[in-house]
Structures are given as structure tokens and as C-alpha cells.
DNA sequence: CGACCTCTTGAGACAGGTCAATGTTTGTGG
DNA sequence: CCACAAACATTGACCTGTCTCAAGAGGTCG
């Protein structure tokens, strides 16, 4: 459970990162990307189950996911962990800690994962001189808020089937943007984690998946997902829900 | 349904606004507040049911609520409106539109309401020169994200009773911060709107309220809420929920 | 190869949704 | 300022989607 440092070799720099066009420095000129690269403190490698940071620890940095995936969890009261987010490559982790001295939730790797640590004070400082970067930061946060609102609408108004459909479509879309197949992918999370995230019991997740298979919407083998009928799935997920 | 302009008299300026200490210019020096005041395009007065802006219209400004209250709704598919947010005085509306050219949802006044329109390009420009303002903008967005996550956890894991308790506590807390009584307040929204927001049927809202009254947690007269037992209510809202 | 997660499947219970009927506010125009 | 319509709120009876509990089948990793 210890972070391991990596030297910042050539191959690790933003300039040659495969996700550069989706990540923070997306809109920067080459020279600016180099500036941006210098403010990155280090690349971290996490193994499955390792913490990126813990709820309550001091906020210092945001993190860009380079490979792998993570989950964000909060422990409210004495209860079990409540799962609020999954992070995939190119996504920015930790933005919700800015306005307090601490991270409001924990982030844990779901598999072997690498992230780039970006100290927020340096990012802030650089953003003063690079309007494009600043604008992009605003945009990222704004987009994050919109995504949250979609989740809120989903949880407040959709049935179990619609939730799972929405979940698959969301993942599919993110994989597509990353340049992976939107039709075949591997879940890095357990059924229980999916259920936690979607507000349903593990058993329900399992049953709905079964139903989807019977209807030939998807083929599921363990954690391998193969989307067979994207159209119907999208329709299902977009339906107006209860009432 | 038409916006009405108001001249910017002395009494309308940020310097003398009662919510200044909670609003955007909170951390600014007096001189800076004056600068901030000049970028505000106008104060708008809305009547109950009037739109501040509509889903899909071009994003130009964010708005600070001065008095009254608003709801944020989205129309997904052919369905009814889905309610994702309530806004009270000093809160900032429209931040989720930054990264697209359009507002992703509509905002409608729940009662007579006044707001300050702040063109985002000017805000951005000013934030370049006032680091304190910039930092505060980041903080506001970060806080917004955290609030959304709390709502997500609530919807995914809490029972109807816990949701309503959480809702009351949230409102109460916001009124307290505004300097109003946290124990007595008036709901500007209908039961149906509450239900829409909390993901439950109107009838359930009504029944749970009835239950709360029987347990002497609150006294309800129409839209007047009187919180009698804050402690138990907080306990209820914080409980770990289902499973 | 065995212990421990993880996933699936079944049966029964229950929270909350739906439908329906009635009472209560609110707002508007005479 | 009152009267009346329309919107809003409550209450009851019933129904259904999802949770719970339980048992067993795969997987996976030391």
C-alpha cells in the first residue's frame, strides 16, 4: 500500500502521452505543453486496491489518470462505503477537494493504474499565465458538474434496467473517446461495486444483466462486456423512467 | 414571461448587497468589489414561473441569486421535467454551461426573484487580474461538485424518510447561512417539485411529511416548515440507509 | 488444491409507486 | 373583497420492482 515513484523518463512526458489530446493540456501549444509537463510532480503506479488518497487527508494535488481505473468512495457515518465515481484514463481526479483543505472522499485503484500528480498550487499559478489552460480548467469542472447532474437524474428517475443500460452506454462512450472499442470492453469493477454506484443490490445487477443477455442486448462473460445492440440499449437508457 | 431591466441604482450595487459575504466577491478588497460590480450587466427581476434561461439557449452569463429562489430542470427525451437543483440567495447559477456553447438545463423562478447577471467572458477576464477571485471561482465550482456528490449518495442509498430529512436539513443549513432562521422557513416549491427532486412520488412526500409530524420532528402548515427536533432529523438523514 | 471472493438464481417480504377519490390553497376576475 | 376555478395536497387501497435472505456455482490466488 505504498506509492512508488518512477523517474520521469522521456517516455513518460505529456508530449508523448497517448491521452494528451483528451487530458488537461489539450489546448496548449507545444511549448506550453512543455511548461505544463514541468509542473507535474511525479507519476505514480498503483496496484489493485491501493489508495491514491484517503478521505480527510490534506488536499494538495489533482491527478490525471494515465492508465487503469479508479473508484471514488466516501464513508459517511458508520456505514459502508458509498461509491460515487469511476475514473478512466485522461480523466482528472480530486477537483472536489479544492475548496477545503482536505479530500472529501477516498480514491482507490481498481486495477494496475498509473496517474500523474499535478500539485494544485502550481496548476493555479500556471493557469494565471496560460489563459487557455485556465479556460480549460473551468471547462473541465463545468463538464464534471454536468456529468453529476446526469447521474442525479438517473438515480432519481430511472428503473434498474435503465440504470444499467445508462451505465454501459456511459462506459462505452468513454472507451470510444479513448480510442478503444465501444462494443467490447472489460469491467474493472465487481458487480457489487456497480450496484453500489447505481444504487441497487448486487443481486439486481446480476439479474438485469441476465435479462439483457436474454434480450440479446449484450453478451457477458464474467467481466467481459460485448454490446450487441447499442441502439436498443441507448433507447432503453434514455427512456423517461418511472411515472 | 419577459425579463425586465432595472437601473443600477446605488442600492443595487454589490458593495451594499446583504449577501456580499457569501457571494462571488466575498474575498475581495473594497476596491476590487467595485471593479467586480462594474462587470455585472444588469439585475433581473423574475416573477414566479418566469425563465431565467432555457435549456439549449446560448451560454453567456452566470447569475448570482439576490433574493427569491429558482429551480433547475432538464427535459430529457419526451419525458417530464427532471428537477436537479434549487437555488437560494447568494448562490451561483449557470456554471454547468461553461464548457458548451449552451445551457444544459433550464432555470425557472419559484417565486418573485432577483438575480445579478454576470457575463462569463468578463468574469474570466477579471479573474485573470484578481487571483483571489479566480481562486474563489475554483472553490465555488469545487463545492458545487461536492454538493452534487452528496445528492448522488443520497439518491443511491437512502430511504424516502432519510431523503426528506436530508432535504430539510440542507434547506435549514442554507437558511442559517443566509442569516434566516434555520428552524422556521417557507418552502417555495410544491410537494411535486420536492418529490421530483428527491426521486419519489408526490404521495410519498406527503406521507413522509405526515409521519414526521406524528413523530414531532417538524410541524408543517402548508408550505411553512417548523423544525422541532433538529437533532433526530440530522440523525435520520445521516443514517446509513438501505442494506 | 483448497480457501475465499465473486457471481448467479430462487423465494418471500416490503418500501414505495400507481390509481383514485376528496379536501385544501391559491390566484384571478368580476 | 368575494367567489370560483384550477392547482396543490392528503389519504386509502392495491400492486409491483427491488431488496433481503439463502444456497450453491464459478473463479482466482496463495
Image (tube, coloured by chain):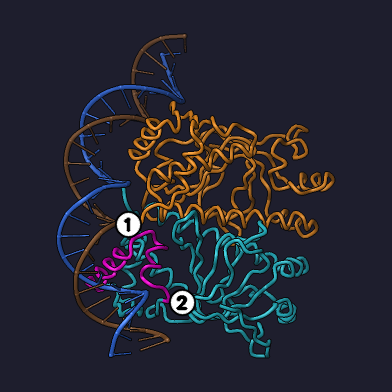
Chain colours: A cyan, B orange, C blue, D brown
Chain part drawn in magenta:
A188-216
Q: Residue at x 51, y 43 (%)?
A: B71
Q: Is residue B106 left or right of residue B61?
A: left
The residue where tag 1 is placed is A159
Q: Residue at x 56, y 43 (%)?
A: B87
In the picture, the quarter occupied by the C terminus of chain B is: bottom left
Give the camera-side residue of A94 and A230: A94
Residue B102 belongs to the span the image colors magenta:
no
In the rendered image, residue B35, in percent from the top left (x then y), is placed at 80, 47
Q: Give above or below for B240 relative to A196.
A: above
Question: Label 2 vs label 1: CA separation?
Answer: 24 Å
- Residue A163, picture quadrant: bottom left
| Residue B100 seen in render | no
Q: Residue at x 37, y 52 (%)?
A: A157
> What subunit carries mark 1?
A
Q: Is residue A230 left or right of residue A106?
A: left
| Residue A8 seen in render | yes
Q: Is residue B143 left or right of residue A49?
A: right
How would you classify the magenta stretch by its main secondary structure? helix
The residue where tag 2 is placed is A175
Amino acid at each position: 500500500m505504498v506509492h512508488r515513484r518512477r523517474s520521469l523518463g522521456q517516455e513518460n512526458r505529456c508530449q508523448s502521452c497517448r491521452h494528451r489530446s483528451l487530458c488537461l493540456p489539450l489546448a496548449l501549444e507545444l511549448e506550453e505543453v512543455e511548461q505544463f509537463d514541468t509542473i507535474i510532480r511525479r507519476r505514480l503506479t498503483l496496484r489493485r486496491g491501493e489508495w491514491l488518497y484517503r478521505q480527510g487527508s490534506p488536499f494538495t494535488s489533482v491527478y490525471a489518470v494515465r492508465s487503469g481505473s479508479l473508484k471514488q468512495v466516501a464513508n459517511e457515518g458508520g456505514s459502508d462505503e458509498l461509491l460515487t465515481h469511476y475514473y478512466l484514463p485522461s480523466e482528472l481526479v480530486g477537483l472536489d477537494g479544492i475548496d477545503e483543505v482536505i479530500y472529501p472522499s477516498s480514491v482507490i485503484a481498481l486495477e494496475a493504474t498509473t496517474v500523474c500528480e499535478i500539485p494544485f498550487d502550481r496548476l493555479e499559478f500556471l493557469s494565471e499565465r496560460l489563459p487557455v489552460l485556465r479556460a480549460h480548467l473551468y471547462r473541465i469542472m463545468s463538464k464534471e458538474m454536468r456529468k453529476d447532474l446526469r447521474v442525479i437524474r438517473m438515480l432519481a428517475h430511472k428503473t434498474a434496467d435503465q440504470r444499467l443500460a445508462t451505465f454501459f452506454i456511459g462506459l462505452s462512450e468513454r472507451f470510444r473517446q479513448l480510442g478503444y472499442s465501444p462494443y467490447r470492453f472489460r469491467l474493472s469493477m465487481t458487480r457489487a461495486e456497480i450496484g453500489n454506484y447505481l444504487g441497487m443490490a448486487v443481486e439486481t445487477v446480476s439479474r438485469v444483466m441476465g435479462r439483457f443477455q436474454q434480450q440479446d442486448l449484450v453478451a457477458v462473460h464474467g467481466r467481459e462486456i460485448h454490446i450487441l445492440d447499442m441502439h436498443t440499449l441507448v433507447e432503453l437508457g434514455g427512456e423517461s423512467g418511472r411515472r
